Amino acid sequence: MKLKNVLVEEEGAVALLSVNRPDKLNALNRLTIQELRMALEDLDSDKGIRAIILRGSGPKAFVAGADIAEFAAYGEREGRELARLGQEELFDYIENLGTPVIAAVNGFALGGGLELAMACHFRVASTNAKMGLPEVSLGVIPGYGGTQRLPLLVGKGRAMEMIMTAGMIPAEKALEYGLVNHLCDPDELEDFCFELARKIVKNSPVALSYAIKAVNAGLRSSESGYQAEIDAFGKCFGTADFREGTTAFLEKRKPDFPGS
């Protein structure tokens, strides 16, 4: 399998999966999402792989967000489809994967990058990590599960504050909030994650898969918040605020939102 934006390395029963667009701070575009899904399917079907570590290439970012240039011209229908396909193809898929996935968060994890980390079964961060959901500063909302997973991890109030301020929190606060399980020095992040993964792979892969299903089942409600997010995300694409937010981002200036 030849991939352009994703690297796969194996060390015993542990796979290291890297988003490899360091010149773009590993921003998620459509191809990267597709390649991550392909790589994860292959690893999950490989009985020799018992755990996966997901990281971003380079020292600056895990994933700095979605590739805004790719969807800045979308309308409501395209926006809704972007969120739906992204959730179904990758983010929900990771959350429900039978093989445990650890996010190794280095540097920036923003927008779709934080949503990607939150879809993993748990997260380890380096001390230089910075996390946030800045979508409202672009006239849109998180669309890859962020409005649903963040409150589950940090609580409603903290999630609302993070989403509404569009700000970043440092690694120490992410640990305090419960957004990440552990912190370590940047140079030790990969080794620390491998140490955790090796503990995981000693256990029954069948039991691990069932445990993931059971934990996820207990967190679901009868109302689909994810569908509500998809609908709201799509509607944002029909607003003047979205056009101004994305245009300002691409033009590297501060937005002046009309509010309609």
Image (cartoon, rainbow, N blue to C red):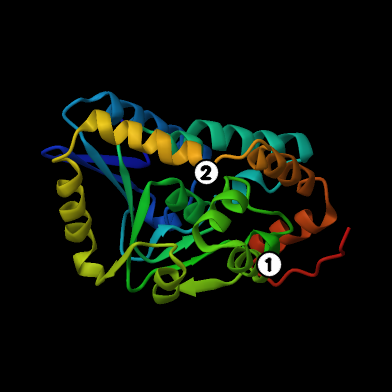
Which quadrant would the N terminus be assigned to in this image?
top left
Disc 1 marks which residue?
A: 164
From this viewpoint, is residue 36 visible?
no
Q: Residue at x 20, y 44 (%)?
A: 200
Vertically, is 50 above or below 163?
above
Report crowding for label 1: few under 14, some 14 to 19, many 20 or more residues within 10 A (C-alpha). some
Q: Residue furthest left?
A: 12
The amino acid type found where label 2 is placed reads Leu
Q: Which of pointers 2 and 1 indicates the residue nearer the eye?
A: 2
Residue 145: x and y in percent read 57, 46
Task: Give the numbered dot on residue 230.
Answer: none
- Camera-nearest residue between 146 and 224: 224
Residue 121: x and y in percent read 38, 46
Q: Residue at x 59, y 32 (%)?
A: 85
Q: CA distance from mark 2 to mark 1?
A: 24 Å
Query: Does dot 1 land on a helix, a strand or a loop?
Result: helix
Vertically, is 199 above or below 129?
above
Q: Residue at x 74, y 42 (%)?
A: 234
Q: Residue at x 48, y 59 (%)?
A: 64
From this viewpoint, is residue 28 visible?
yes
Q: Is residue 224 left or right of residue 102?
A: right
In the picture, residue 46 is in which quadrant?
top left
Q: Is residue 129 left or right of residue 241?
A: left
Report crowding for label 2: few under 14, some 14 to 19, many 20 or more residues within 10 A (C-alpha). few
Disc 2 marks which residue?
A: 219
- Camera-nearest residue between 28 and 24: 28
- Camera-nearest residue between 11 and 248: 11
Query: Does dot 2 land on a helix, a strand or a loop?
Result: loop
Q: Earlier in the sequence, mark 2 or mark 1?
A: 1
